[in-house]
Amino acid sequence: MIEFQYFNGCPHAKDTFQNLREVMTEMGIVDGDLHIINVTSPEAAQKIKFQGSPTILVNGIDICTGEKPVGFSDSCRVYEFDGIRTEVIPMEFIRKKMEGYR
């Protein structure tokens, strides 16, 4: 199962979601494998251990930390890839982390 977690108003969720969808299409992963979760409150964030917007989980594992989420954050998420800070998870990174999915 793939989860895309975000909150309304996150300016980077749309671009990360598009990157995820493109990788899923390339890999032949069907829409039924994707669960989209709009986190609407701090209470909801705490309940699902939301790590910030946007977050992608594959089989319950955060693709950026390689671990099951602990704690929670109700804010935009900032990543670092190859020494560059960004709020969007790049397609290349998503593709690498989803190799062997199923």
Image (spheres, helix red, strand yellow):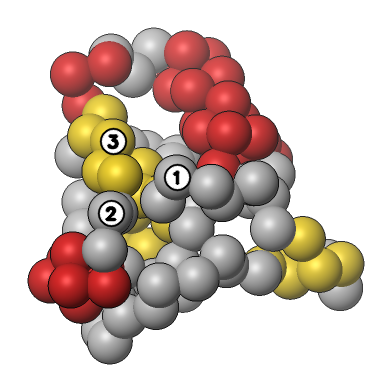
Tell me what residue is drawn at x 37 percent, y 63 percent. Answer: 62
Task: Determine whether the residue tagged by mark 2 lies in a helix, strand or loop.
Answer: loop
- Name above or below for residue 63 compared with residue 12: below
One can see residue 66 in this view: no
Query: Circle 1 sits on which residue?
Result: 8
CA–CA distance between discs 3 and 1? 12 Å
Residue at the left extreme of this rendering: 47
Earlier residue among tags 3 and 1: 1
Question: Are there few (<14), some (14-19), or many (20+) residues within 10 Å of tag 3?
Answer: few
Tell me what residue is drawn at x 18 percent, y 64 percent. Answer: 44
Residue type indicated by callout 3: Ile
- Name above or below for residue 61 compared with residue 22: below
Residue type indicated by callout 2: Thr
User: Which sits in the foreground, 91 or 86?
Assistant: 86
Task: Determine whether the residue tagged by mark 1 lies in a helix, strand or loop.
Answer: loop
- Name above or below for residue 39 compared with residue 31: below
Callouts 1 and 2 close, C-beta under 8 Å: yes
- Name above or below for residue 45 compared with residue 63: below
Question: Are there few (<14), some (14-19), or many (20+) residues within 10 Å of tag 2?
Answer: few
